[in-house]
Amino acid sequence: MTLARLHPLIRDTSRRPLHTTQRHTTYLAVSITLLLNSTTNLDADNPTTWPIWQTLAPHTTDLHSQATTHPDTSDETLIDVCGLTQKTARYLGEAGLHQSARDLFAELLPIYEQVQGVEHPEILATRHNLARWTGAAGDPAGARDLFAEVLPIYEQVLGAEHPDTLDTRNHHAYWLGKAGDPAGARDLLAELLPIYEQVQGVEHPEILATRHNLAHWIGVAGDPAGARDLFAEVLPIRERVLGAEHPDTVTTRYDLAYWIGAAGDPAGARDLFAEVLPIRERVLGAEHPETLNTRHNLARWIGAAGDPASARDLLAELLPIRERVQGVKHPDTLDTRNDHAYWTGKAGDPGRRPRPARRGAPHP
């Protein structure tokens, strides 16, 4: 796909006469249609599309702002621009801009509700995504509560075994665990998995995601060897179904590395994280949150395998990047600061040795 880049100054200057000639609504409708057509086959989950989305995002958000503030915008145009905005917000989240995704979904929700009603499937999808990126932006309890609110509506509108309902149950369990109840997450996922397998088949990507998350919460709830073994079962299936470098496959390899270490093999974890890191840097980018998670865990298992000074130094390099990319109060930033202090103590400063944080990054 070839895209022409339009400088924002030229765009804004060219648009001004439209307000005085009463053609603004036509301009909006045509522009939104063109962008919708341009994004039809752009999967926000696929990192290869992100450079195109990066080019389109300023234009889509500009059109969203115009359409939602202009008094003569029709409901049909609002629905179209909301669909375009939802795609853009999803790209922002998948590309690692979690706070931007959360904020755009929060802005989108009341507009969608105004034109389509609170139980329309698109409104439910928007609430689902708002909950997901609220958690990813650093508020797991908020995500848990938002998913708990929208889940019974999914069940009422779509049915208890609709794939979107099951996906929402999966996410609710995930954020329940992240908010402090790993055993509850484990039990909900154990209930969900056989239903999912019956509805969609044992190798459907969503079933693999559920097995992945179940393995993670089994580990966090106290069985690291069980988690390790389940991840080892899921990994070759994801490699066959999705490909060896699909982000979900790499996430499973990442979590397998973590639980290999937690089950008693820090050198094995270190070596596998060392393999995962260049893949994530190439596929997701050097400053994507999941790449930063990989750097964090590589440092941690380097320390656990007997080199605390290197762990300290790697975390010292990582911390300012976390602070800039994710914010100084994000849970991942706090974990990195905590583990840096821990390995500083282990490397020879016993006055700075808090307990290291448990780290993993399941993929909901």
Image (tube, helix red, strand yellow):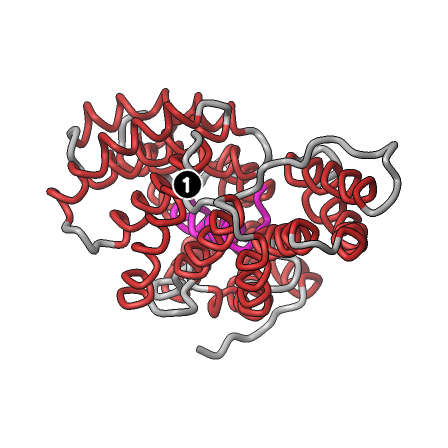
In the image shown, does 48 or 217 lie closer to the viewer?
Answer: 217
The residue where tag 1 is placed is 216
**SS at badge 1:** helix
In the image shown, does 285 or 112 lie closer to the viewer?
Answer: 285
Q: Residue at x 55, y 50 (%)?
A: 61
Q: Is residue 336 above or below residue 252?
A: above
- Visible in this render: residue 189? yes
In the rendered image, residue 158 lying in the magenta stretch gets the answer: no
Q: Amino acid at mark 1?
A: His
Q: Residue at x 45, y 23 (%)?
A: 181
- Quarter-wise, where is residue 277 in the image? bottom right
Q: Is residue 274 above or below residue 70?
A: below
**Lateral position of residue 158 relative to residue 323, left or right:** left
In the image shown, does 311 or 137 lie closer to the viewer?
Answer: 311
Work out which quarter of the rendered image holds the C terminus and state it.
top left
Q: Residue at x 20, y 55 (%)?
A: 203
In the image shown, does 220 or 16 lie closer to the viewer?
Answer: 220
**Lateral position of residue 39 relative to residue 319, left or right:** left
Residue 1 lies, in percent from the top left, at 44, 77
Residue 281 lies, in percent from the top left, at 60, 66
| Marker count (numbered) | 1
**Lateral position of residue 292 relative to residue 244, left or right:** right
Numbered range of the magenta stretch? 81-98
Residue 175 lies, in percent from the top left, at 44, 30
